[in-house]
């Protein structure tokens, strides 16, 4: 069976699930062109059904960023394990990240995506939707180290203050920070603000064995935001 036929059949299953229900789940181990197409098709199908297609470009950009981040987080853990670094040790974490950034490439992403599958590490994309709103959770089944959580909290806090990417880049340059540091979180917040969506509907939840990036999009005033007894950034 050709790749095009496989893609078509998966999209047909996505369409049926969206048409007949209010839940949809997609699972992957790495980001590929095919995975991107399925994510985009799922989002388009949901927004078309709920009559909010105007959000497609912003939400697709956000969702793609979150899935890539989840895949990288899983792959990074495998890299640390292979190199013998303790991700919870500050010194090991610093050395491991320097080496990871130095060697990271598209070829490495493909290789470690396969290793993630072998080790049972995945990224799950959960959609829940109805006429009142859309909830998307991007779950990767590996938690983050304490120092990573601290950095992420700070980046998200700072990202809330930006209204456009030019402002973000200027602030980075003035503070002498590495180009692109925190760009993903800033992009999410700025795109939500651009759509008139309260950025507080975006949350990162830290659990003992997984990390969840949750994005909620209210369609009506009847939408009820989800809250859990978890550490939330």
Image (spheres, rainbow, N blue to C red):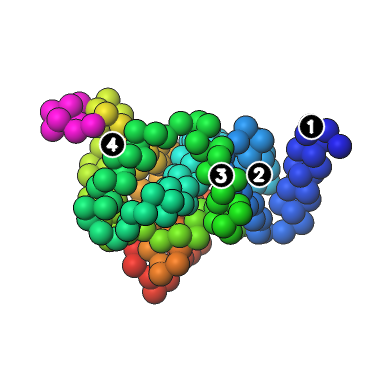
Separation of residues labelled 1 and 4 (CA atoms): 37 Å
The answer to whether 179 appears left or right of 106 in the picture is left
Q: What residue span does the magenta drawing correspond to?
A: 170-178
- Read off the residue under disc 1: 4
Check if residue 96 falls in the magenta segment.
no
Q: Is residue 40 above or below residue 215?
A: above
Quick one: label 1 or label 4, which is nearer the N terminus? 1
Secondary structure beneath disc 4?
Answer: loop
**Relative to 13, is 118 on the left or the right?**
left
Which picture quadrant has residue 37? top right
Q: CA distance from mark 2 to mark 3?
A: 22 Å
The residue that disc 3 covers is 113
Q: Residue at x 37, y 54 (%)?
A: 84
Report helix, strand or loop for mark 3: helix
Disc 1 versus disc 2: distance between alpha carbons? 17 Å
Q: What separation in Å lies between label 4 and label 3 (alpha carbons)?
A: 23 Å
Residue farthest toward the right in the current orientation of the protein: 1
Dot label at residue 42: 2
Secondary structure mostly taken by the magenta-highlighted segment of the chain: helix
């Amino acid at each position: 069976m050709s790749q095009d036929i496989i893609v078509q059949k998966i999209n047909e299953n996505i369409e049926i699930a969206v048409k007949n229900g209010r839940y949809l789940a997609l699972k992957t181990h790495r980001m590929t062109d095919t995975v991107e197409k399925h994510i985009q098709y799922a989002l388009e199908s949901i927004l078309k059904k709920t009559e909010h297609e105007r959000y497609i470009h912003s939400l697709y950009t956000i969702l793609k960023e979150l899935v890539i981040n989840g895949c990288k987080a899983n792959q990074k853990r495998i890299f640390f394990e292979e190199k013998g670094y303790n991700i919870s040790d500050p010194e090991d974490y610093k050395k491991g990240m320097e080496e990871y950034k130095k060697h990271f490439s598209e070829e490495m992403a493909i290789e470690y995506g396969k290793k993630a599958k072998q080790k049972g590490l995945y990224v799950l994309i959960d959609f829940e939707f109805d006429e009142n709103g859309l909830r998307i959770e991007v779950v990767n089944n590996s938690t983050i180290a304490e120092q990573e959580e601290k950095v992420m909290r700070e980046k998200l806090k700072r990202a809330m203050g930006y209204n456009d990417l030019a402002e973000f880049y200027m602030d980075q340059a003035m503070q002498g920070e590495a180009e692109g540091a925190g760009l993903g979180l800033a992009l999410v917040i700025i795109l939500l603000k651009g759509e008139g969506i309260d950025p507080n509907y975006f949350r990162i939840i830290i659990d003992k064995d997984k990390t969840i990036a949750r994005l909620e999009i209210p369609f009506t005033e009847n939408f009820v935001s989800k809250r859990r007894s978890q550490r939330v950034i």
